[in-house]
Image (cartoon, coloured by chain):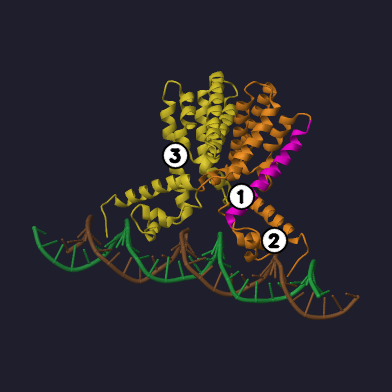
Chain colours: A yellow, B orange, C green, D brown
DNA sequence: TGTACATCAGTGAACGCGCGTTCACTGATGTAC
DNA sequence: TGTACATCAGTGAACGCGCGTTCACTGATGTAC
């Protein structure tokens, strides 16, 4: 059946959105195209009217997730205490408990590194975030401090998600949040 | 065929060793039992003479990797400047380039968090490392600082592995190493 | 304005493949006599 | 010491399953006349 002018573009976007959520929540390898299309009320065969392969979807969905996160970051950075707000948001239990809506780095970076050739979009995401953080720092080693901050953010969020003990999980978030905000105060 | 008394124990250990390397290098989901057994010169059917399931192997191999890393850490901590040595080793290009011999956290934590129920062994590994770091710090907030240091170590190593640009990868390792050593100096 | 036709997003069966797991079996060795 | 037997680590074919991908097809809609 033929659909209205922008129907295909809408379906395309729905696939990308659902994929970017599932890749972040379940991982790339554990996300099947069949269940994904079924969740959208479509059959799996139609997938190839939109993408050449799963790899192409991975690229597109990773780019979408990266851009989506940039927008979320900008909201935090628009507040009075930009870096403090960003740190609070990033290391919140809400972010920890909703990986499908959050930063793709803690969930996908390891898997992307293990795949044959890593994607330049990871670099893009890392550089985006580094530039944004460094821009708010007044210290002369702002670039280096930004790298350390991002590493701590990504590492703490991933660790808080992977431990079983809820108290340990919270302790990781709280300690990292506290230390980073002190560092941000000193360098900002 | 029947083998000498400790033959089975030796095979068991060979499987665990090979699995703990592959899980760290390729991830759990991407590691097949068939290729794993073949690499050891065995057929896949024999696997179930040693383990109830792949999940049981994951538990055993993760425990082995965690214990193996503890030994490597102890070597670094036995040197004159314990924490400095540990940081240097952890954030070295050698560690980045040999995930199969290194810390399981940057490679497996995300995947373990995504699986149904996370393993208590992850908690064990995190607590082990935290305790070791905190013990070398004299600051009163040693426990909190240890959490931040571990987060930075794990995050920086994972990021350095997942970016495509070799210069960015090195920059991440170098910045994190420098900052952590300063922090260790101040708190140690 | 009304009708015939071309388009093409989506359908659903089928493909080969590798996965984790099962199972009847083999055959070299340790043990019992 | 020599022989018959029990053991059981490892074999390899087979299982059902879900994966990514292909492809002949459908049928509602936009377009041409």
Find residue B164 and report its image quarter: top right
The numbered mark at residue B178 is: none
Residue B56 belongs to magenta span: yes
User: How crowded is the residue under tag 3: few (<14 C-alpha within 10 Å), some, or many (20+)?
Assistant: few
Q: Which residue position holds label 1?
A: B59
Quadrant position of the N terminus of chain A in the picture: bottom left
Q: Toward the viewer: B78 or C23? A: C23
Q: Which residue position holds label 3?
A: A98
Find residue A152 and report its image quarter: top right
Please state the extent of the stretch shown in magenta in the rendering: B53-79
Q: Same chain, marks 2 and 1? A: yes
Residue at the far top in the pictured view: A186
User: How crowded is the residue under tag 1: few (<14 C-alpha within 10 Å), some, or many (20+)?
Assistant: some
Residue B117 belongs to magenta span: no
Disc 1: host chain? B
> In the shown orientation, is residue B65 left or right of residue A120?
right
Question: Where is residue B39 drawn, in percent x and y?
Answer: 68, 61
Disc 3: host chain? A
**Cα separation between marks 3 and 1:** 26 Å
Asked if residue A50 can be seen in this view, the reply is no
Question: Where is residue C26 drawn, in percent x and y?
Answer: 69, 76
Question: Where is residue B4 drawn, in percent x and y?
Answer: 78, 64
**Image vertical order of residue B57 relative to residue A138, above or below:** below
């Amino acid at each position: 059946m033929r659909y209205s002018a922008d129907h295909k573009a809408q379906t395309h976007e729905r696939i990308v959105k659902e994929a970017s959520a599932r890749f972040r929540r379940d991982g790339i390898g554990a996300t099947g195209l069949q269940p994904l299309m079924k969740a959208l009320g479509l059959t799996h065969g139609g997938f190839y009217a939109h993408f050449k392969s799963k790899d192409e979807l991975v690229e597109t969905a990773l780019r979408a997730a990266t851009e989506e996160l940039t927008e979320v970051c900008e909201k935090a950075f628009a507040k009075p205490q930009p870096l403090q707000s960003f740190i609070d948001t990033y290391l919140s239990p809400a972010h920890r408990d909703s990986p499908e809506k959050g930063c793709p780095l803690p969930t996908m970076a390891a898997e992307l590194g293990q795949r044959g050739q890593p994607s330049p979009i990871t670099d893009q995401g890392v550089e985006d975030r580094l530039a944004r953080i460094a821009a708010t720092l007044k210290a002369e080693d702002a670039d280096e401090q930004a790298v350390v901050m991002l590493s701590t953010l990504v590492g703490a969020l991933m660790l808080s998600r992977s431990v079983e003990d809820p108290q340990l999980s919270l302790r990781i978030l709280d300690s990292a949040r506290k230390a980073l905000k002190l560092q941000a105060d000193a360098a900002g």
